[in-house]
């Protein structure tokens, strides 16, 4: 007969697994290209860089198909921190409409090993829509990056953010073999 302690332990494991099912998928090649390009656009470790990750609308687990780099959308947005003006968002929405894609996440770099959100990150979501994912890559993307190295942050509107790190980040950010 199962004791209440055993049942609770099983329930906790199931709940943890269930709550950290994949939220986003990206192919291996596109992931590696994105990390390398972020490192290059960050001038090899001198500044932050970032991009929007685009997928088909309405997918339960979005599969990233396209990357739109912040400085392609707004060439003057990388000013120490990232500040995208209205012109950049206008180009982003035009791109999404033209290719039938939607923004499912953003990814940006931080200077050191910390992949937690800064106060600026928390107060200014790139897309202020519930369910939007913000990925933070360490060391200005100047090294190889695995999902467990990334901070994965989901915007929950008025309820703030939910974050995953390490093995939790690996469960919600899936790199697909391609």
Image (spheres, grey):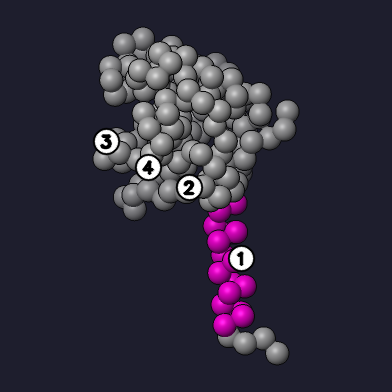
**Badge 4 element:** loop
- Mark 4 neighbour class, 10 Å CA radius: few under 14, some 14 to 19, many 20 or more: many
Instruction: Please provide percent x and percent y for residue 149.
Output: 51, 39
Tell me the distance, in whole angstroms, between the alpha carbons under discs 4 and 2: 8 Å
Q: Pick the quarter of the image with the C terminus.
A: top right
Report how far apart the C-alphas of labels 2 and 3 lie in the structure: 19 Å
| Residue under label 3 | 120
Give the alpha-carbon distance from disc 1 to disc 2, as whole Å: 18 Å
Q: Which one is nearer the viewer's eye here, 155 or 147?
A: 147
* Disc 1 from disc 3: Cα separation: 34 Å
**What residue lies at 42% left-to-right and 29% top-to-bottom?**
139
Residue 115 place in picture, x, y as percent: 41, 39
**Chief secondary structure of the magenta portion:** helix
Residue at (58, 45) in percent of width and height: 170
In the depicted structure, whether residue 23 falls above or below residue 19: above
Residue at numbered disc 2: 165
- The answer to which quarter of the image holds residue 6 is bottom right
> What range of the chain is rendered magenta?
5-21
Q: Is residue 19 above or below residue 31?
A: below
Provide residue 75's location: percent of width, then percent of height: 36, 9
Marks 3 and 4 in Cβ contact (< 8 Å): no
Report which residue position mark 4 lands on.
116
Find disc 1 in the rendering and name its residue: 14
11 to 124, vertically: above or below: below
């Amino acid at each position: 007969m199962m004791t209440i302690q055993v049942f609770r332990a099983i329930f906790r494991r199931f709940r943890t697994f269930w709550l950290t099912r994949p939220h986003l998928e990206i192919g291996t090649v596109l992931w590696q290209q994105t990390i390398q390009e972020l490192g290059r656009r960050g001038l090899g470790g001198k500044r932050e860089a970032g991009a929007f990750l685009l997928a088909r609308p309405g997918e339960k687990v979005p599969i990233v198909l396209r990357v739109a780099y912040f400085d392609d959308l707004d060439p003057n947005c990388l000013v120490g921190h990232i500040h995208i003006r209205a012109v950049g968002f206008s180009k982003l929405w035009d791109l999404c409409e033209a290719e039938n894609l939607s923004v499912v996440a953003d990814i940006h770099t931080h200077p050191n090993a910390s992949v937690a959100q800064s106060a600026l990150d928390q107060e200014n979501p790139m897309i202020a829509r519930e369910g939007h994912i913000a990925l933070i890559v360490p060391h200005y993307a100047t090294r190889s990056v695995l999902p467990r190295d990334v901070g994965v942050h989901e915007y929950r509107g008025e309820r703030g953010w939910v974050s995953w790190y390490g093995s939790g980040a690996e469960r919600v950010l899936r790199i697909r073999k391609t």
